[in-house]
């Protein structure tokens, strides 16, 4: 059975992007040759190992890192846990982690499970002040700083390049929302990415650990050679993820500029045409494809449902906690509206006509929902 393509109103690529054409072609070819255990010495094993090595080299080349700094994991969440907690375990200063208040729940849960949190607030755009984070990093017992490359809910790019951490404090960056779409910042000791967010197959994460980083395995190991290994790699999926990453990096200047302009249209039209709305996130220093806004007197889930019935797929609330019906911790930390929240994230081929169609439909949908509650 052939899966249908993403609909013309699919505006939720930040949750998961459709398989990139480059990944689809590679995945189908690799299924024939990449099924075996890449650590076996027979011919199928050697073929699988060659594909795995090729995927690691291609990923490293696309990200500007060394091939031996790349490890594939079963998910971006697992890469976050492994990378961050490995730095905590390898720290000589202690188990304290200074992190922004808008970090992904994967970071927050990892810290709650295996470290001690020192949380740092942000401004109304969700951007942390480097001097505040540096002050927290100098606290007794803090050996690790966790700062996302860009926020997964509002798109704000964090000032990682402005950080000047002490030599004995390691930086972990969650790049799951930005990997492939933006160049990696400088100065990190470990970083994490998630393939299904750039158009690779689901079930592939990328963990990057710098060669000289003080990193130690935080979880029980297995009999694999790589101490960062998390078990048997899905070689065809890993190779397809690498192919998609290469393609996304090659086209990101053109795609990013087009998406940035389309998001500017959404930001401008929503603010002008929908009463009592707050468009959030940094208007300039942001991911190119993502925009978030909150509508007063509107339930976010109702807005998602009504727009879905009109052919527009969007997200509401926290990308990972919307199903719990609890307010987004990111929006709470920013001090902005937490309900009636909508996140759009454009696909690589989203057109101006599709953006205008969404903006045309939105005011009427919001007005209809508000009328039901007497507003």
Image (cartoon, rainbow, N blue to C red):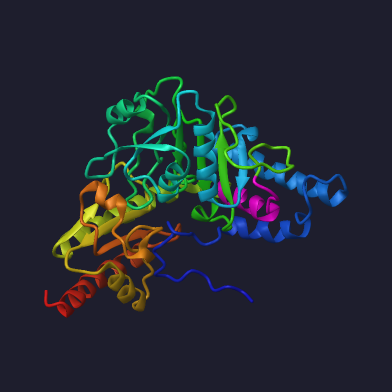
Residue that sits furthest to the top in the current view: 167
Locate residue 157, reporting x and y percent.
Answer: 35, 41
Residue 356 belongs to the span the image colors magenta: no
Q: Residue at x 50, y 27 (%)?
A: 91
Please tell me whether residue 257 is drawn above or below residue 85 in the rendered image.
below
Locate residue 19, reporting x and y percent.
Answer: 55, 60
Q: Residue at x 60, y 42 (%)?
A: 219
- The dominant secondary structure in magenta is helix
**Quadrant of the image for the N terminus?**
bottom right
Locate residue 51, reporting x and y percent.
Answer: 73, 47
Residue 237 belongs to the span the image colors magenta: yes
Please tell me whether residue 236 is drawn above or below residue 230 in the rendered image.
below
Q: Residue at x 62, y 41 (%)?
A: 71
Please state the total of marks drawn on the protein image: 0
Q: Residue at x 47, y 47 (%)?
A: 176
Residue that sits furthest to the left in the current view: 375
Q: Is residue 222 left or right of residue 165?
A: right
Q: Is residue 228 left or right of residue 191?
A: right
Residue 15 quadrant: bottom left
Please tell me whether residue 294 is drawn above or below residue 1 in the rendered image.
above
Locate residue 236, reporting x and y percent.
Answer: 69, 55
**Quadrant of the image for the C terminus?**
bottom left
Residue that sits furthest to the right in the current view: 42
- Front one among 174 and 64: 174
Magenta residue span: 230-245
- Front one among 311 and 190: 190
Q: Is residue 126 left or right of residue 297?
A: right
Residue 134 quadrant: top left
């Amino acid at each position: 059975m052939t899966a249908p393509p993403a609909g013309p109103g699919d505006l939720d690529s930040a949750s998961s992007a459709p398989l990139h054409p480059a990944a689809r072609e590679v995945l189908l070819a690799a299924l024939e040759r990449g099924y075996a255990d890449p650590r076996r010495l027979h011919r199928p094993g050697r073929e699988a190992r060659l594909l795995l090595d090729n995927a690691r080299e291609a990923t490293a080349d696309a990200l500007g890192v060394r091939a031996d700094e790349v490890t594939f994991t079963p998910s971006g969440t697992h890469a976050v846990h492994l990378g961050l907690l490995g730095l905590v375990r390898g720290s000589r200063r202690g188990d304290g982690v200074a992190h922004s208040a808008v970090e992904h729940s994967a970071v927050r849960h990892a810290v709650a499970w295996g470290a001690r949190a020192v949380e740092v607030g942000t401004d109304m755009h969700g951007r942390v002040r480097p001097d505040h984070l540096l002050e927290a990093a100098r606290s007794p017992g803090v050996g690790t700083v966790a700062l996302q490359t860009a926020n997964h809910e509002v798109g704000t790019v964090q000032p990682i390049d402005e950080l000047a951490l002490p030599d004995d404090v390691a930086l972990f960056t969650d790049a799951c929302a930005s990997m492939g779409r933006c160049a990696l910042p400088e100065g990190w000791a470990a970083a994490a990415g998630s393939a299904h967010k750039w158009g690779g197959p689901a079930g592939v994460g990328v963990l990057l650990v710098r060669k000289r980083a003080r990193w130690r395995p935080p979880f029980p190991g297995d009999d694999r050679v790589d101490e960062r290994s998390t078990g048997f790699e899905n070689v065809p999926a890993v190779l397809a993820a690498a192919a998609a990453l290469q393609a996304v990096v090659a086209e990101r200047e053109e795609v990013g500029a087009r998406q940035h302009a389309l998001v500017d249209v959404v930001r401008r039209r929503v603010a002008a045409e929908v009463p009592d709305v707050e468009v959030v996130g940094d208007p300039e220093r942001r991911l190119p494809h993502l925009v978030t806004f909150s509508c007063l007197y509107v339930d976010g889930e109702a807005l998602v449902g009504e727009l879905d019935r009109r052919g527009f797929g969007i997200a509401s609330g926290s990308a990972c906690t919307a199903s719990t019906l609890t307010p987004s911790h990111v929006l709470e930390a920013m001090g902005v509206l937490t309900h009636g929240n909508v996140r759009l994230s454009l696909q690589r081929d989203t057109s101006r006509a599709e953006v205008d169609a969404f903006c045309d439909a939105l005011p009427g949908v919001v007005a209809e929902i508000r009328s039901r509650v007497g507003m």
